C-alpha cells in the first residue's frame, strides 16, 4: 500500500524543510520526499491532497500517563494511544507510576506487548529510577533498557535522597539513557496543593513555594555536573527554574528540560472556585512565570513541550480540592494550545515541531520526529485555521479532566498517519 | 429590603458591606426575640436544617442547632462518626443523600477548604459555611462584628487587633474581610511563621511585636493556638509563645481604657490568654456566644427569602 501526500506545506526541521513537498509512503515507512515526485500514476497509490494544510512529523510526547497496568478506570493503553493520535502524537512515553510500578523488565515487557496488541501509536515505556519509586534502591536499569525502556523517572515523586540520585545519574551513563527528574522538595512542599501566595492564603489552601521546585532543579543540575549523567527536567513551572537551567546550559552541563502547555497557558487563578481540574503538580503559577517559560521556550532553554497527560476518573476529581488527585488530560489539547505560541510569535512552527517531535526523539534516542526517507511513516497533517471549542465529552481519553473546557482554540490535526495507517479526524 | 442575593453563605469574601450590615441589622431583631420569655418564632416552620459536620465541633453546631430551632425548623445533626463517610462514601454522595431527606439548609463544616463551595454547586439546598479548612468561618466573623457594633456603637474607624495563628485561622480570614469591608482598621499580631507574607495586601497592618500592635486598640481578638503547631516548628514552645504573644492584663493595659477582648473559643488559658483577662470585666467572650445565636438566626432567615 502506497500513500502520496501532495500539495501540503511540509515542515521538517530534521531536514530543514519548510515548503511544498510531496511525500510517498510505502508500507510503514517514508519512501521519498521531494518538491515533486515522479508521477507514475498507479491505482494502488492512495493520494492525500493536503492543500492549505501543514504536514509535520508525528509528534512525540515524552511525558504521558497511560495508567495501565493498575488504573484502567482512568485510562488504558488503548484509549490513551487513541487520544494521542487524535492529538497529533504518533509516539508516547508511558510514565512508570502504574500499579505495579514499571520497575522491572517483566512489567516493561507487559506494557510493550499490550501496546503492540492494542496501542494505536508507538509506546515507549519509561522505567522507574528506583524500585517501587521508593527512592531507596536503583531499579534494574540495564535489563529494563533491553526490554524497551527509553528513559528512567520516578515521576510523581522526586528521588529524595541526593546520594541515590547521584548513583542513578552515574549508573545510567553505562546505558546512555536520560534520567528524568520530577523536581519537588517534599519537605518544603509539605502537602501543598497550589502555588503559594496571596491566593493560596485567601482560598485557605496550602501553598507550594516555587523554591520547592527550584531547589531540586538546582540540586539535580549540580549532580549532573558532578556525574556527567544525562539529566532531563520534567514539567518546569517557574521563572527560577528557567533561569537555573539556562545558566547550567551555558556552563555546558548535560541537561534538557520540558514544560507543558498548562504552564504557559494558565495561572493559579484557574483554580478559583476550587476547580480541581486545574489542580496539577507542580501547581499553576503566575503571569511572571508564564512569561519566563515563554522566554525559555523561545531561547532554547526549554527543549521540549510535553503533555504530562494525567487522566483521572470524573469521580476522583469531583471532591475536596486538597484530596483530589493532580493532573490534566492533555493529549487532545496540547498541540492546539502550543500553536498559540506560534500565533503569538514566540516561536516559529518549525521550532514548535522541534519541541514537540524532533527534540524529544533526540533526547530519547528514538528514530522518530523526522520525515527522512527510511523513517517510520509517522505524520500529522494540521489545519492551522480550523477553530474548535474544547469539549471534554468529545475526548477519546477516558480522562475528561481539563481546565480548558469551553476554550476556543485554533489549529488542529485533520489527519494523523501512524506507521503508515491513516486516521482522519472530522 | 430583600434578602441575601445568593442561595448560599460561603464566605464573607463574597458579601458586600451592605449585605453584611443587613445581616447585622436583622440579627438585632432576633436578639430581641431571644430576650423574650418565649424565645421562639414560627418564621421557618416546616423547613429542614441539616448540620453536616465532618469535623468535630460543639459550640458552632449547637449554636446553629438552637438558632434553627428558635426559627421553628426541624433540625437534624449529621456528624462523621455516625455517618457512612467512614464506610468510604464520597462527600457528594453523602450530601446528596442528606438533600434527598428533604434538607432546605445544609450547615457544613469540613477540614478541607472549598467543600461548601463544591456542595453549593452540586446541591439545591442552601449551603451555609460553618468553617472550611483554613478558608473562612463567616458566621463567626458576623457575630464578632455584631458584638463589636453592640459594644462600641460602630465598626468604622475602630482599631481592631487580631493576635495569633493568622495563617491557619479561618476565623481570622473572615474577620479580616468583614472588618475591612466595614471600615475598621485591622492589625495582625503574631510570630512571622504564623502571619503569611504578603497578607498586608488585604489592607491590614502587620506587627511581630505585640506591645506595639496593642497600643491604642479598641478591640483585641485573641485566636486559639493549636498545640500541634509547636511540633511543626512554627514556634519553639508554648512558654515562649505566651511570653511574646500571650495576652496578660499588663499587656492589655496598652490598649485603650475601654478596649474589649474577644476570643472565638475554645480558649487555651495560659497559652494565648491569661485567666484574669479572659474573665475580666472587659471580656465579651460569653456575649459573643449569645450573639452567635442571633446572627445565625438572621442568616437562616435571610437565606430562606422570607419577608419580614
Image (cartoon, coloured by chain):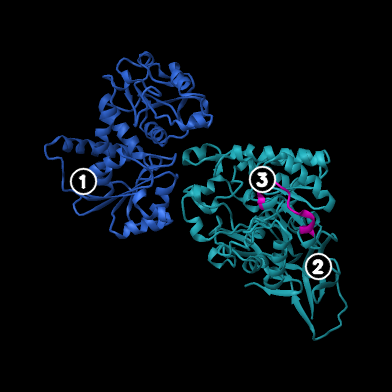
Q: Earlier in the sequence, mark 2 or mark 3?
A: 2
Callout 2 touching callout 3 (CB < 8 Å): no
SS at circle 2: strand
The disc numbered 2 marks a residue on which chain? A
Cα distance in 3D space between marks 2 and 3: 45 Å
Q: Which residues are magenta?
A: A132-145
- Does residue A316 appear to the left or right of B307 in the view shown? right
Q: Please give the chain letter of the residue carrying mark 3.
A: A
Chain A: its colour in the image is cyan
Residue at the disc numbered 3: A158
Residue A271, given in percent of the width and then of the height, sits at 52, 48
Q: Is residue B132 visible?
A: yes
| Position of B244 relative to A68 (above/below) | above
> Chain B's shade in the image?
blue
**Residue visible at 44% across and 46% down in the picture:** B114
User: Where in the figure is residue B236, as x and y percent of width and height?
Assistant: 52, 24
- Disc 3 secondary structure class: loop
Q: Are marks 2 and 3 on the same chain?
A: yes
> Residue beneath label 2, please?
A20
**CB atoms of marks 1 and 2 within 8 Å:** no
Mark 3 Cα-neighbour bin, 10 Å: few <14, some 14–19, many ≥20: many
Amino acid at each position: 500500500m502506497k500513500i502520496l501526500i501532495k500539495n501540503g506545506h511540509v515542515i521538517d526541521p530534521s531536514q530543514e524543510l519548510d515548503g511544498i513537498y510531496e511525500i510517498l509512503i510505502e508500507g510503514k515507512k517514508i519512501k521519498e520526499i521531494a518538491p515533486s515526485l515522479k508521477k507514475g500514476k498507479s491505482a494502488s497509490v492512495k493520494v492525500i491532497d493536503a492543500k492549505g494544510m501543514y504536514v509535520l512529523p508525528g509528534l512525540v510526547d515524552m511525558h504521558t500517563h497511560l495508567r495501565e497496568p493498575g488504573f484502567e478506570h482512568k485510562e488504558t493503553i488503548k484509549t490513551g494511544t487513541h487520544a494521542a493520535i487524535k492529538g497529533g502524537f504518533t509516539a508516547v512515553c508511558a510514565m512508570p507510576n502504574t500499579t505495579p510500578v514499571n520497575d522491572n523488565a517483566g512489567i516493561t515487557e507487559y506494557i510493550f506487548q499490550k501496546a503492540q496488541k492494542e496501542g494505536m501509536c508507538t509506546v515507549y515505556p519509561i522505567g522507574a529510577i528506583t524500585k517501587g519509586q521508593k527512592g531507596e534502591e536503583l531499579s534494574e536499569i540495564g535489563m529494563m533498557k533491553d526490554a524497551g525502556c527509553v528513559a528512567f523517572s520516578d515521576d510523581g515523586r522526586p528521588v529524595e535522597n541526593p546520594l541515590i540520585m547521584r548513583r542513578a545519574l552515574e549508573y545510567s551513563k553505562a546505558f546512555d539513557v536520560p534520567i528524568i527528574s520530577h523536581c519537588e522538595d517534599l519537605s518544603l512542599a509539605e502537602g501543598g496543593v497550589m502555588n503559594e501566595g496571596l491566593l493560596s492564603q485567601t482560598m485557605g489552601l496550602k501553598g507550594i513555594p516555587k523554591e520547592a521546585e527550584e531547589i531540586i532543579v538546582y540540586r539535580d543540575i549540580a549532580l549532573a555536573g558532578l556525574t556527567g549523567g544525562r539529566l532531563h527536567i520534567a514539567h518546569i513551572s517557574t521563572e527560577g527554574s528557567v533561569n537555573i537551567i539556562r545558566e547550567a546550559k551555558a556552563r555546558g552541563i548535560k541537561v534538557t528540560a520540558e514544560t507543558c502547555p498548562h504552564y504557559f497557558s494558565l495561572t493559579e487563578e484557574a483554580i478559583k472556585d476550587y476547580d480541581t481540574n486545574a489542580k496539577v503538580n507542580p501547581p499553576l503559577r503566575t503571569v511572571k512565570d508564564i512569561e519566563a517559560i515563554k522566554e525559555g521556550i523561545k531561547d532554547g532553554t526549554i527543549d521540549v513541550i510535553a503533555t504530562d497527560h494525567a487522566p483521572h476518573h470524573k469521580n476522583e476529581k469531583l471532591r475536596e480540592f486538597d484530596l483530589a488527585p493532580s493532573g490534566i488530560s492533555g493529549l487532545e489539547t496540547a498541540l492546539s494550545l502550543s500553536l498559540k505560541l506560534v500565533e503569538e510569535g514566540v516561536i516559529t512552527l518549525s521550532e514548535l515541531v522541534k519541541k514537540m517531535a524532533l527534540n524529544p526523539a533526540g533526547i530519547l534516542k528514538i528514530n522518530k520526529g523526522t520525515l527522512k526517507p527510511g523513517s517510520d511513516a509517522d505524520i500529522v497533517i494540521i489545519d492551522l485555521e480550523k477553530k474548535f471549542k474544547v469539549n471534554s465529552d468529545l475526548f477519546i481519553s477516558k480522562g475528561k479532566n481539563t481546565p480548558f473546557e469551553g476554550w476556543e482554540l485554533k489549529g488542529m490535526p485533520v489527519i494523523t498517519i501512524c506507521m503508515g495507517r491513516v486516521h482522519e479526524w472530522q | 429590603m430583600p434578602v441575601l442575593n445568593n442561595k448560599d453563605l460561603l464566605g464573607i469574601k463574597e458579601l458586600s458591606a451592605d449585605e453584611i450590615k443587613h445581616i447585622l441589622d436583622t440579627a438585632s431583631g432576633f436578639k430581641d426575640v431571644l430576650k423574650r420569655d418565649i424565645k421562639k418564632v414560627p418564621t421557618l416552620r416546616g423547613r429542614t436544617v441539616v448540620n453536616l459536620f465532618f469535623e468535630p465541633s460543639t459550640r458552632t453546631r449547637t449554636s446553629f442547632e438552637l438558632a434553627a430551632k428558635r426559627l421553628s425548623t426541624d433540625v437534624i445533626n449529621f456528624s462523621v462518626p455516625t455517618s457512612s463517610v467512614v464506610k468510604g462514601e464520597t462527600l457528594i454522595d453523602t450530601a446528596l443523600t442528606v438533600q434527598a431527606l428533604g434538607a432546605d439548609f445544609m450547615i457544613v463544616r469540613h477540614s478541607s477548604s472549598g467543600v461548601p463551595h463544591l456542595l453549593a454547586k452540586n446541591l439545591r439546598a442552601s449551603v451555609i459555611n460553618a468553617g472550611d479548612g483554613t478558608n473562612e468561618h463567616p458566621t463567626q466573623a458576623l457575630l464578632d462584628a455584631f458584638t463589636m457594633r453592640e459594644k462600641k456603637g460602630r465598626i468604622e474607624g475602630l482599631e481592631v487587633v487580631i493576635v495569633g495563628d493568622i495563617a491557619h485561622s479561618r476565623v481570622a480570614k473572615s474577620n479580616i474581610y468583614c472588618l475591612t469591608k466595614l471600615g475598621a482598621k485591622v492589625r495582625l499580631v503574631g510570630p512571622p511563621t504564623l502571619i503569611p507574607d504578603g497578607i498586608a495586601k488585604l489592607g491590614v497592618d502587620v506587627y511581630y511585636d505585640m506591645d506595639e500592635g496593642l497600643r491604642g486598640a479598641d478591640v483585641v481578638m485573641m485566636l486559639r493556638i493549636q498545640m500541634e503547631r509547636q511540633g511543626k516548628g512554627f514556634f519553639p514552645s508554648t512558654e515562649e509563645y505566651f511570653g511574646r504573644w500571650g495576652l496578660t492584663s499588663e499587656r492589655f493595659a496598652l490598649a485603650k481604657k475601654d478596649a474589649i477582648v474577644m476570643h472565638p473559643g475554645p480558649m487555651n488559658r495560659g497559652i494565648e490568654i491569661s485567666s484574669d483577662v479572659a474573665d475580666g470585666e472587659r471580656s465579651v467572650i460569653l456575649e459573643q456566644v449569645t450573639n452567635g445565636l442571633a446572627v445565625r438566626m438572621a442568616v437562616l432567615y435571610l437565606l430562606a427569602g422570607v419577608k419580614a
